[in-house]
Amino acid sequence: MEHSTSIKNEQKTAVNPLNGFIGRKKVSLTDEEIIKDLLPQKFGMRGMVWVGILVIICLVGVYSYYRQLRYGLIVTSMRDYASWGIYISNFVFFVAISLVGSLITAVLRLSGVHWSTPLTRIAEIIAVAAITFGAIIIIVDMGSPERFYNLFLYGRLQSPIIWDVTVITTYFFISLLLLYIPLLPDMKILLAGKEKKGIYKLYSFLGSFWKGTHLQFRISKKAVNILCIAIVPVAFSIHTVTSWLFATTYRPGWDSTNFGAYFIAGAFLAGAGAVNVAMYIFRRYYNLEKYITDDHFDKMGKITVMLGMLYLYFNVNEYLIPYFKMKKPEEAFLNGLFIGQFAIIFWSAILGGMIIPMIILLFKKGRRPLPMFICGIMIVIGAWFKRFLIVTPTLLHPFLPMHNVPESYKHYFPSFDEWAIALGSLAGALLVITIFARIFPIIPIQETLIEQHEKEHH
């Protein structure tokens, strides 16, 4: 009864999807079903357990960071040579995953692809969560967080690090706006459908000014289009600049003019894999089978295969040509990847994180929800270890040979505190996504209504 009353209230103030004005027309049963299906859902027992696990992992990470602040970076396994380690690997991974926002929201929207509508908000919250914790992990890597303000006091434009800070900040705010602006029409539905108390004060704070007028819809549509255009070069810049941080150093494994395109291709694949995983989870546990259909998985599977082939090409170019030339400085580095101490991780990342998922997704049965979920998990895990391989082996193969140094300097395996902080950051990103899905609709309600009415009209 309570929900039925809320729907009737919504009928009086609902936006007519055909003309953008606040309509007096009675909402159809189909509209009621859409609104009911897409409203945020309370956590069940599994949801509470999931949140509890993430919170515990985050707290362990916070405690390890406290230990790092108290005792210094000596609690890590990073030394004079492996001075970046797992933290920078995590940073590059987060930056890569964040590219999914521009892929799904901007590129597909600007291409006139309408089937991606149920995926846009999923992609954007992944992008915002990833880039947020990517920035946090950089502060963790600094050791003393008070050094961060020195970037703003003494930063120089000649430094690629300042370029990185600039594009990361810009990308974060554009992604946040691309998440927020399309959310405004849904805020009105949320405010009309529930009593304004508790968490709904947040809805009022964020979206009470939205009246659903034709002018507001026109301005928001124009703003989203501008942001979609702007985020594409910014997204390419953030991954190019991140690659330049490595490529501008004269080291084997990083001394490559191919790194910019290599990073972008890998980021597209990692982001697509993350969306595939999120699609399956939200579809299954939020009962969204009518909105995230098998056709969505099929189309995303084809996109993932295309991106995987592109990334495979850059991998061949990145490793085969230097291995064919076999310059002396790069010989030990490449042998360490192909047949040495990093061979198991390297071939597992190449085969398990790229080639095997591509083979599975080439077949139609492989592009069904469960195989897509498994392939997405493989791609994301492979992407993380690929970033680890970008950072660590190069640092352990300097141009000048290691002489008269402790044995621990010649090897690197993350300490417990490093693993705890890294896993804590990953859990933090997942926690942000989980809480967002609890508070806001994970699929745009208003855009879904508009598309439904357009289909009926045609």
Image (tube, helix red, strand yellow):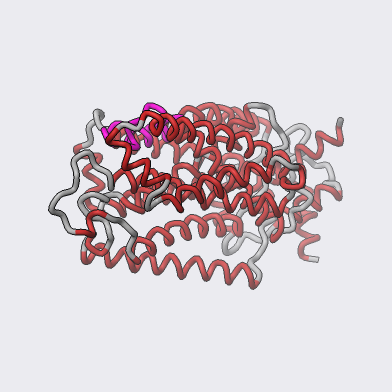
Left or right: 184 in relation to 254: right
- What span is colored magenta in the figure? 238-261
Residue 139 visible to an observer of this rendering:
yes
Residue 144 visible to an observer of this rendering:
no
Q: Number of marks in the image?
A: 0
Seen in the picture, residue 339 relative to 251 is either above or below; the reply is: below
Queried whether the magenta region covers residue 127, the answer comes back as: no
Asked whether 287 or 400 is in front, the reply is 400
Screen quadrant of the C terminus: top right
Seen in the picture, residue 421 relative to 29 is either above or below; the reply is: below
Give the x, y percent position of residue 239.
43, 35
Seen in the picture, residue 260 relative to 199 is either above or below; the reply is: above
Asked whether 263 or 409 is in front, the reply is 409
Q: Residue at x 46, y 57 (%)?
A: 426
Quarter holding residue 24: top right
Left or right: 396 in relation to 315: left
Quarter holding residue 250: top left
Q: Residue at x 46, y 30 (%)?
A: 317
Q: Residue at x 40, y 39 (%)?
A: 168
Asked whether 121 or 445 is in front, the reply is 121
In the current view of this chain or complex, which residue is farthest to the left? 404
